Image (tube, rainbow, N blue to C red):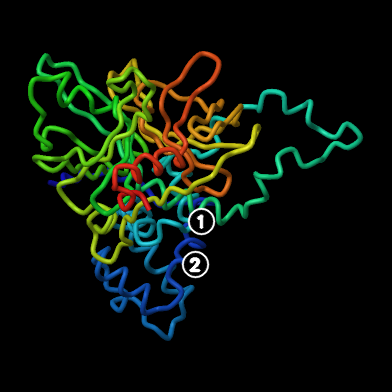
């Protein structure tokens, strides 16, 4: 089941820097007339041949398309549809950010504790953490742009009416990885029965309060594919992960269910043991206490305080509802699964440990 919510339109044409950025984004995304014409006709239902032709040149045709969408008050549709076709396009993502169609990626950054003591005091500039490297800005934003469409919000109601929230992310076309404690109240032993998968909602693309949301659900039965609890039966500490099976192949579906859009894809976690002070980022849906529901997607950035191959302690901000979120390194690779937070540090489970646990159960193919 997929339930798509529509977004609001804007009044009036884009102006100034927003218009210039959109023009740059469209130009970089659709570099030939044939590509632009196909996008306009199939996705936007606009026939450019009514007002222009191929010989007019790509610049002119982009101006014609933007002017026509302005007149029909469909600028938001133009922006979101172009981004759906090219989710990794940095210029289009910037336009979405300017129009509040997605979140600001650097709104929440913390200093690394003790980082000042590692600086070369003889120089203002120095390499603090060699493992962090120097990522290309466009490459980073492109990877982040792809990941935005692969992270989801998980929610379900308990028999008493209380609602549970968490974050998860696609690791295959039909598999989502999250914390076990996010879904433990949906099955035994917390319940005398297991909730039907269609009672557990998985929402994608919830990036702002007005974002269109792709709503999916889990398989009706046998939706818990693999897991390890937070506390095992022998009282030892578990890895707190759960792999859930979706009722549909969301990773293979086109973003926004729009013909011609890019397929959503999924994240492929890597084995990486981060060094102290190495930056980490978390894409998450923290719980909004005032609104009583999950927040739109947020990216928080912090630094590793310690890592032992099983747990990664870090300083990136999280809240209830952030459980099950992917933890990225500076190269936008998933290296951990957010687990829980404390007043002094937050904890993620290292992907190395999760992969090893799956391999010990003969399930290594679930997380490759």
| Residue ID for mark 1 | 91
| Residue at 35 percent of width and 21 percent of height | 288
Indicate whether 86 appears above or below 236: below
Task: Indicate the position of residue 90 as horizontal and vertical percent values.
Answer: 51, 55
Indicate whether 351 appears above or below 338: below
Mark 1 closeness class: few <14, some 14–19, many ≥20 residues within 10 Å: many
Q: 272 left or right of 357?
A: right
Task: Indicate the position of residue 147 as horizontal and vertical percent values.
Answer: 41, 48
Task: Indicate the position of residue 88 as horizontal and vertical percent values.
Answer: 45, 57
Query: What is the distance, in whole Å, between disc 1 and disc 2 at their CAs?
Result: 8 Å
Q: Secondary structure at mark 2?
A: helix
Residue 296 appears anywhere in the view: yes
Mark 2 closeness class: few <14, some 14–19, many ≥20 residues within 10 Å: some
Residues at discs 1 and 2 in contact (Cβ within 8 Å):
yes
- Mark positioned earlier in the residue sequence (1 or 2): 2
Q: How many marks?
A: 2
Residue 70 appears anywhere in the view: no
Residue 140, disc:
none
Question: 103 or 156, which lies in front?
Answer: 156
Q: 293 left or right of 12?
A: left
- Residue at far bottom of view: 55
| Residue at 38 percent of width and 26 percent of height | 286
Indicate whether 230 appears above or below 39: above
Question: 239 or 362, which lies in front?
Answer: 362
Question: 88 or 192, which lies in front?
Answer: 192
Q: Secondary structure at mark 1?
A: helix
Q: 8 left or right of 60?
A: left
Residue 28, disc:
2
């Amino acid at each position: 089941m997929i339930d798509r919510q529509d977004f609001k339109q804007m009044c009036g044409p884009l102006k100034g820097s927003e218009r210039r950025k959109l023009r740059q984004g469209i130009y970089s995304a659709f570099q030939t007339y044939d590509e632009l014409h196909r996008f306009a006709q199939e996705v936007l239902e606009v026939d450019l041949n009514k007002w222009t032709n191929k010989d007019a040149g790509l610049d002119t045709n982009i101006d014609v398309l933007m002017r026509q969408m302005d007149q029909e008050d469909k600028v938001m549709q133009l922006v979101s549809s172009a981004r759906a076709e090219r989710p990794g396009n940095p210029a289009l993502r910037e336009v979405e950010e300017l129009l509040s169609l997605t979140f600001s990626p650097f709104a929440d950054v913390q200093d690394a504790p003790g980082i000042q003591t590692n600086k070369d005091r003889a120089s203002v500039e120095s390499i603090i953490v060699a493992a962090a490297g120097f990522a290309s800005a466009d490459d980073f934003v492109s990877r982040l742009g792809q990941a935005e469409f692969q992270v989801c919000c998980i929610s379900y109601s308990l028999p008493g009416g209380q609602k549970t929230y968490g974050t998860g992310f696609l690791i295959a076309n039909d598999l989502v990885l999250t914390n076990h404690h996010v879904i433990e109240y949906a099955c035994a032993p917390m319940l005398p029965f297991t909730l039907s998968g269609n009672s557990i909602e998985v929402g994608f693309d919830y990036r702002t309060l007005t974002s269109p949301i792709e709503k999916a659900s889990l398989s009706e039965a046998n939706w818990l594919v693999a897991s390890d609890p937070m506390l095992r039966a022998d009282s030892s500490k578990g890895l707190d992960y759960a792999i859930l099976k979706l009722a549909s192949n969301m990773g293979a579906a086109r973003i926004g269910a729009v013909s011609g859009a890019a397929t959503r894809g999924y994240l492929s976690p890597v084995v990486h043991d981060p060094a102290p002070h190495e930056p980490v980022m978390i894409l998450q849906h923290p719980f909004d206490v005032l609104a009583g529901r999950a927040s739109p997607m947020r990216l928080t950035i912090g630094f590793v305080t310690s890592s032992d191959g099983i747990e990664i302690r870090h300083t990136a901000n999280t809240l209830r509802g952030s459980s099950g979120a992917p933890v990225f390194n500076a190269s936008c690779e998933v290296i951990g699964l957010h687990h829980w937070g404390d007043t002094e540090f937050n904890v993620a489970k290292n992907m190395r440990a999760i992969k090893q646990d799956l391999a010990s159960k003969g399930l290594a193919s679930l997380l490759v």
